[in-house]
Amino acid sequence: MTPVECFNRWAGDHEWSDWAKPTLFAQGAMRNIVGTAHATDLLNAGGRIVDDHARTISAGTGERRACIVLDYPGDLAVAAGAALSRRGFAPVPLFNGVHSVQSPVIDNTSLIHALIALADHVTPGADPAPVFLLDSRRLEGSPSPGRYDNRWVVFPQDFPSGGRLIASGIRECHIITAANRIQDDLAHVLKRWQEAGIEMFDGVPGSRRPVIVAPPPWYRSVFYRMAAVTGLRPNAYGAFGALIPIAAATGYSYG
């Protein structure tokens, strides 16, 4: 399977396809990674996450539909997304950190393995609701000179607006996170959706416990984007990832 074919399987052909990020699929590195991850094991892992968090969540129909935001470590987010595609949801991968084999801050190898191994298992069906897939590791790691810093954040522009969701009948959002907390960059998205009239719920099975998203730092500030990328390494392709220069006696060396 070529990277383009893999991306087309994940992006699909539905109303949420335009938000799928091609970052990891567009890299030549994907051609050099064999999808060795066992699809059955991954699907079982994804199924367990769904059973633990989303067993009672329905995509719904008509004017009362639900979306999911799933913020889990890379390959597990992919696995849960594939499992949810069998329940009327369309996985929308939003992974935006570049892959590198040169001492990356975040190792995306297992994430790419999962995308390749499960591409044929994405079956969202007709008129699906979206499940937005994030890697909860996106700001983890210890950047240092000589390493490839591929940490990343999401912005409200990476998602459909609250008004766009409501126009498609989305009236509620279920938030599934590995650490049982909403990271600040995601809070900037969810708070806007909540203000637009979308109800928020946590991912506890059967509870439908409402979530009130607190305004995160720099909320709606014109300086937010600049503050959010401080210390990160956006690149010219709209993604994140670059080598951290090594200081030398006469200037900088890039290794």
Image (cartoon, rainbow, N blue to C red):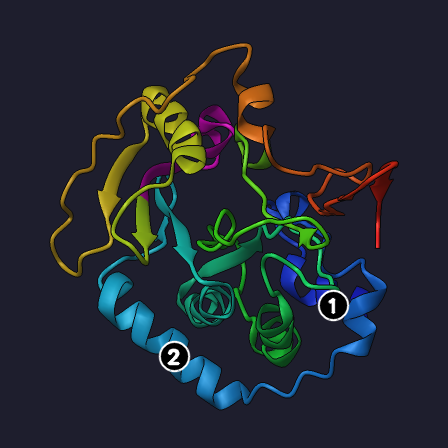
Q: Is residue 211 visible?
A: yes
Q: Counting other residues with Cα less than 10 Å from the Cα at mark 1, is it few (<14), some (14-19), or many (20 or more)?
A: few
Residue bearing mark 2: 45
Q: Toward the viewer: 80 or 59?
A: 80
Q: Toward the viewer: 176 or 111?
A: 111
Q: Amino acid at mark 2?
A: Ala
Q: Toward the viewer: 104 or 144?
A: 144
Quadrant location of the C terminus?
bottom right
Left or right, residue 156 beside residue 171: right
Q: Counting other residues with Cα less than 10 Å from the Cα at mark 2, is it few (<14), some (14-19), or many (20 or more)?
A: some
Pinpoint residue 183: horizontal percent, then vertical percent: 37, 40
Image: 81 above or below 40: above
Q: Amino acid at mark 1?
A: Val
Left or right, residue 215 beside residue 112: left
Pinpoint residue 218: horizontal percent, then vertical percent: 43, 17
Quick check: is 105 in the magenta stretch?
A: no
Left or right, residue 249 beside residue 160: right
Image: 199 above or below 23: above
Left or right, residue 184 beside residue 223: left
Q: Nearer the viewer, mark 2 or mark 1?
A: 1
Can you tell which quarter of the image residue 158 is in? top right
Can you tell which quarter of the image residue 27 is in? bottom right
Residue bearing mark 1: 101
Image: 179 above or below 219: below
Q: Where does the magenta region start and end? A: 161-173
Pinpoint residue 117: horizontal percent, then vertical percent: 62, 81
Pinpoint residue 235: horizontal percent, then vertical percent: 77, 39
